[in-house]
Image (cartoon, rainbow, N blue to C red):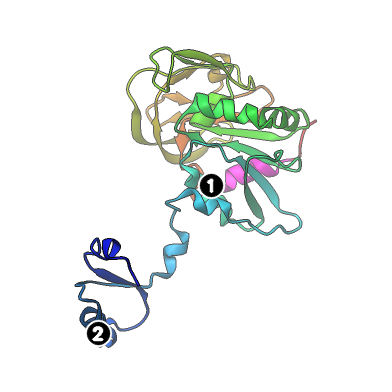
């Protein structure tokens, strides 16, 4: 069945997702060895909890979710360099919440309760892609109509006035205009921040835990109203005037049941026009 070149690359085989007593398949494993000539590397048992583990590939974002009445709609623009998309996995499992990763070639759904800008491996390039799709117009209209916006890490940087790359970290040195929904500016410079963190979500005085992995510093008037405060007293993120636009550098904010409930209550709050 295999071309000789492909067959030559096979070092052995694994039997995956086996249910029951593995010793019952000993004869089957030996039969595969005898017929194929390949050594067995073992048997991996079926693990029911695997469906709740974070996805490892963005292909999962193509899977549509069915819509039901009375649910909250969270829309995530699927940007070309999206990262840490598993931030939204806990919301995908939450009853009454539908998460849509909006693909290219279509406007962002107008009925969204929350538009969440995800992390990005290339903030400036993804800002350009967002504008190319016209999603910047959709996001601004969403805010004017009372909708909420959350930016995480690179998404937070996009919400500000500008993103500066003086050292050419992402490409040629440049100053890219942001969406202007937060009065902050970002400079991409310095070493990458990588650490676990915990503290309090300031507006709700609710505890949070998560992790940081980013390059750059963000500052400005709205950062004087931080979204988060770490246990060591450092602030992180920003809250726009009116409280409907928020951003921060911390990933994993939806993982804990209690802190996820706080975010869901914020999403569900009645729109203020």
As drawn, the label of residue 88 is: 1
**Nearer mark to the viewer, of 2 and 1:** 2
For the point 72% across and 35% down, the residue is: 147
Asked whether residue 88 is drawn in magenta, I would say: no
Q: Is residue 156 left or right of residue 10?
A: right
Asked whether residue 262 is drawn in magenta, I would say: yes
- Above or below residue 210? Residue 182 is above
**Alpha-carbon distance for marks 2 and 1?**
44 Å
Residue 131, percent from left and from top: 64, 27
Residue 205, percent from left and from top: 54, 35
Residue 238 visible somewhere in the drawing:
no
Looking at the rendering, the stretch of residues picked out in magenta corresponds to 257-269
Q: Tag 1, which secondary structure?
A: helix
As drawn, the label of residue 31 is: 2
Q: Residues within 10 Å of mark 1 (few under 14, many from 20)?
A: many
Disc 2 + disc 1, Cβ < 8 Å: no
- Above or below residue 48? Residue 162 is above
For the point 66% across and 42% down, the residue is: 267
In this view, the residue farthest toward the front is: 4
As drawn, the label of residue 55 is: none
Which quadrant, please, contains the N terminus? bottom left
For the point 28% across and 70% down, the residue is: 14
Residue 29, percent from left and from top: 25, 81
Magenta span: helix, strand or loop, mainly?
A: helix
Q: Tag 2, which secondary structure?
A: helix
Q: In front: 46, or 33?
A: 33
Which quadrant, please, contains the C terminus? top right
To which quarter of the image does residue 18 belong? bottom left
């Amino acid at each position: 069945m295999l071309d000789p070149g492909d067959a030559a690359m096979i070092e052995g085989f694994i039997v995956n997702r086996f249910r029951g007593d593995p010793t019952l398949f000993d004869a089957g494993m030996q039969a595969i060895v005898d017929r194929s000539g390949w050594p067995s590397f073992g048997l991996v048992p079926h693990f029911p909890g695997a469906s709740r583990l974070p996805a490892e590939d963005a292909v999962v974002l193509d899977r549509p979710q069915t819509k039901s009445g009375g649910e909250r709609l969270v829309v995530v623009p699927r940007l070309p360099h999206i990262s840490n998309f598993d931030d939204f996995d806990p919301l995908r499992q939450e009853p009454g919440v539908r998460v849509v990763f909006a693909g290219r070639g279509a406007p962002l759904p107008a009925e969204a309760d929350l538009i969440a800008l995800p992390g990005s491996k290339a903030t400036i390039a993804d800002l350009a892609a967002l504008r190319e799709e016209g999603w910047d117009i959709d996001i601004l209209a969403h805010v004017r109509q009372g909708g909420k916006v959350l930016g995480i890490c690179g998404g937070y940087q996009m919400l500000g006035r500008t993103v500066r790359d003086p050292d050419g970290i992402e490409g040629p040195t440049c100053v890219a205009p942001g969406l202007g929904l937060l009065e902050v500016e970002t400079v991409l410079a310095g070493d990458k921040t990588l650490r676990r963190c915990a503290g309090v979500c300031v507006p709700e005085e609710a505890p949070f835990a998560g992790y940081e992995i980013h390059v750059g510093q963000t500052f400005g008037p709205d950062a004087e109203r931080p979204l988060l405060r770490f246990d060591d007293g450092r602030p992180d993120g920003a809250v726009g005037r009116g409280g409907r636009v928020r951003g921060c550098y911390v990933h994993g904010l939806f993982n804990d049941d209690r802190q996820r409930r706080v975010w869901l209550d914020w999403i569900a709050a009645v729109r203020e026009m």
